[in-house]
Amino acid sequence: MILKTDHYNLGATTLEGLFLRLARQMLIIQKTSSLNPNEITDLVAVDTDETEKRASVSIANVTGNFKLDSLDIITPFTDTLTPAAEGLAPPWNATNHLEALIKIGIKICNLERNSEINKNSKFIFDYSIASKGDVVEPHFDISLNATDIPLIITLNGQTSISESDSWLTGEVG
């Protein structure tokens, strides 16, 4: 997996690398957001195992609905989850980084479920959507987990070590 600094260049990174970069961005946003910290501290969590060279990401406590081809996140209030200072729009036509992270995770999960693509039946990504009936409009709770994302990947018979950022081995500053 290649983790490039230019994490919005889809041609320069794998989807897994993009997913990890967006997870990192969400950790920073969670830490610096003006929202009530209790509302967003448990949205995205990242754990790494440097010995095994693997990372795991979990996303929870998100409520939303589908609007046309986009994911409309209702909880948490996401307007402050897109830092203007970054000057970069989230990828995949998402309105914020959390939406992009979820959309990419669902895309990878769906690719993993396709036996023509995933011939080894290795599953890293999983998500669940539960209907939420206590509101007027149809909403859902969504959670997504990516367990043991390899930080070393073999492509075309060649092994390459990820160009991992320091956040994979330490805390987000």
Image (cartoon, rainbow, N blue to C red):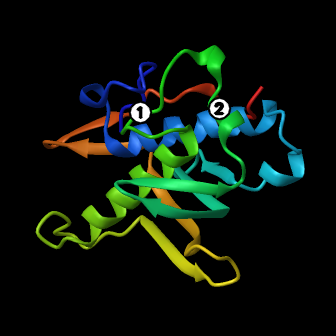
Which class describes the residues within 10 Å of circle 2: few (<14), some (14-19), or many (20+)?
few
Q: Residue at x 29, y 31 (%)?
A: 10
- Measured as percent of width and height from the top left, residue 73 is found at 59, 55
Task: Please state if 115 lies on the left or on the right of 36 as rendered.
Answer: left
Task: Establish if 110 lies above or below 130.
Answer: above
- Choose top left, top right, bottom left or bottom right for residue 139: bottom right
- Measured as percent of width and height from the top left, residue 3 is found at 42, 30
Judging depth in this view, the residue of 73 and 163 nearest the camera is 73
Task: Establish if 101 lies above or below 143.
Answer: above
Amino acid type of disc 2? Trp
- Measured as percent of width and height from the top left, residue 100 is found at 47, 44
* Numbered mark located on residue 167 in the image: 2
Q: Which residue is mark 1?
A: 162
Q: Residue at x 56, y 81 (%)?
A: 131
Element class at badge 2: helix
- Choose top left, top right, bottom left or bottom right for residue 6: top left
Amino acid type of disc 1? Ser
Question: Quick check: can you spot residue 53?
Answer: no
Q: Residue at x 55, y 38 (%)?
A: 96
Residue furthest to the bottom = 133
User: Which one is earlier in the sequence, the residue at label 1 or at label 2?
Assistant: 1
Image quarter hosting the N terminus? top left
Judging depth in this view, the residue of 158 and 33 nearest the camera is 33
